[in-house]
Amino acid sequence: EPAEPEGPPTQLLETSDLVNTRWELLVVPREEGWLPSDDFLAEVTLLADGSVVWGGAVGGPGTGGRWTLNGETLEIIRTTPLGLVSGRDYYMSNALAEVTSGLQLALRGVIRSYNAIYPVAVVADFVAVRQSGRFVRDSGED
């Protein structure tokens, strides 16, 4: 008799699974980190040109970044308009996604961050759930 699988089913993501997708993130700050202690929601859209659009608690004017899938590691970099002063965040995840009960893809990872006051440290954990649809940047051209 075959053994019951442990945990939810998984899928190794490829670039085509990530291009022009939007993800909702639940960010859980680590006790030893310097982020505020309450959990918060964020959003990120991974665009075909490698750029990202941030929303929720981590969005705002001048916030940008880029993303890349390198082997089995997804790295999403969040940049801010003041550079080193306001810091940079690295969202790192294994590209092995869980398939949720709602048949959505979910990734688990960590956030490494630094700024002018704090050195590089792992400051939070996150769970990212892919939202339905594909998204593109509106260029304003018809």
Image: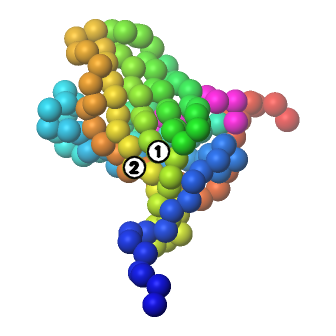
Task: Look at the image and tell me in which quarter the C terminus lies.
Answer: top right
Q: Which stretch is magenta? A: 48-55
Dot 1 falls on a residue whose secondary structure is strand
Question: Do the residues bearing badges 1 and 2 touch, measured as CB atoms within 8 Å?
Answer: yes
The reply to whether residue 138 is visible in this rendering is yes
Q: Is residue 62 left or right of residue 86?
A: right
What amino acid does circle 1 point to? Asn
What residue is rendered at 34% in x and 28% in y? 112
Say the numbered circle drawn on residue 106.
none
Q: Nearer the viewer, residue 91 or 54?
A: 91
Q: Is residue 51 magenta?
A: yes
Question: Looking at the image, is mark 1 or mark 2 nearer the viewer?
Answer: 1
* Whole-percent x, y for residue 64 in the image: 52, 24
Q: Residue reaching furthest right? A: 142
- Answer few, some or many: residues within 10 Å of disc 2's Cα (few below 14, many 20 plus, some between 14 and 19): some
Q: Nearer the viewer, residue 51 or 136?
A: 51
Q: Which residue is mark 1?
A: 94
Dot 2 falls on a residue whose secondary structure is strand
* Whole-percent x, y for residue 7 in the image: 38, 69
Q: Quadrant of residue 37?
A: top left
Q: Which residue is mark 2?
A: 108
* Whole-percent x, y for residue 120 in the image: 29, 19
What residue is rendered at 45% in x and 26% in y? 78
Q: CA distance from mark 1 to mark 2?
A: 7 Å
What amino acid does circle 2 point to? Arg
Q: Nearer the viewer, residue 73 or 36?
A: 73
Q: Going from the N terminus, do you reach mark 1 or mark 2 first?
A: 1
